[in-house]
Image (cartoon, rainbow, N blue to C red):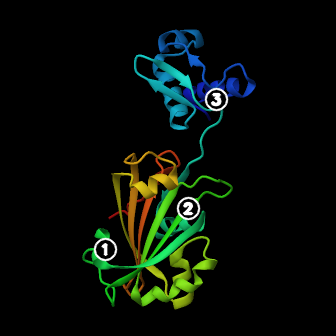
Amino acid sequence: MSTLYEKVAQSIMDQIEEGSLSVGDGLPPEADYAAQLGISRTTLRLAFEKLENQGVLERRKRIGTKIISAAPKRRYSMATTDLNDLLNLGRDTRLVLRGTRTVRTADIPELDGLVSETGHWLEITGVRFMKGETEPFSVNRVYVPARFAAIEPALKDVETSIFEAIETIFKVQVGRIQQSVTARPCPATEAQLLGLAEHSATLQIQAQLFTEEDALLEVSLATYHPERFQMNTDLRIAPK
């Protein structure tokens, strides 16, 4: 059952779709609009917040609320409850590779303290899309240690995840993931690929994937467009 604020948000969307409200229109001040609708200002603010999070409204202090989009913007929602959910990010989206190169451990700060047998890594760069979308929601850099670097010739057939190709070719399986989430300014290359201004705030997820035998399989650095991605975690604690 929808809450009152959700019904208010849907009513605003209906008016936009019908044409009685248009992109660029400003909405009345909160107090006036709430009185007009016969609801509390708190309910209206929740409705506005929902539409703002969907990219439909823009609210600016002392300026007001304006319609900036006729439809909610799609976001990739990564909901995690276990290891398989973390791996599904790659399985449920499309990865378009942009290139590879060989780098040394010392070249990449995020590889500090990690070991590749030769001291070299295969760097794989790509952009990730939701199915049916033309704008990427993340830029991905994957670092594969020397033991699995022979994966490179098979990359031309990869459309989901690097780790799945490694699992198939080398007959191994991901058994553990270490992951950290960091807010960071967007580097120039990632900003260009994502259509953001350089140094815009972005979310970076760094993940280390290990085989069931605890051998490092890959290091993944993913930079996400803040308006096209959200992450939800729902973990159940086992009773003692």
Q: Amino acid at mark 3?
A: Gln
Name the mark on residue 10: 3
Query: Does 18 sit left or right of 71 as displayed?
Result: right
The front one of 44 and 152 is: 152
Q: Secondary structure at mark 1?
A: helix
Residue ID at (42%, 84%) = 212
Q: Is residue 101 above or below residue 132?
A: below
Q: Secondary structure at mark 2?
A: strand
Q: Is residue 53 above or below residue 160?
A: above
Q: Residue furthest left?
A: 113
Q: Amino acid at mark 2?
A: Arg
Residue beneath disc 1? 107
Number of other residues with Cα within 10 Å of mark 2, as a class: few under 14, some 14 to 19, many 20 or more: many
Instruction: Kindly report the distance in space between the C-alpha atoms of the residues bearing marks 1 and 3.
Output: 50 Å
Residue ID at (53%, 14%) = 34
Instruction: Kindly report the distance in space between the C-alpha atoms of the residues bearing marks 2 and 3.
Output: 30 Å
Residue beneath disc 2? 128
Give the mark nearest the N terminus, 2 or 3.
Answer: 3
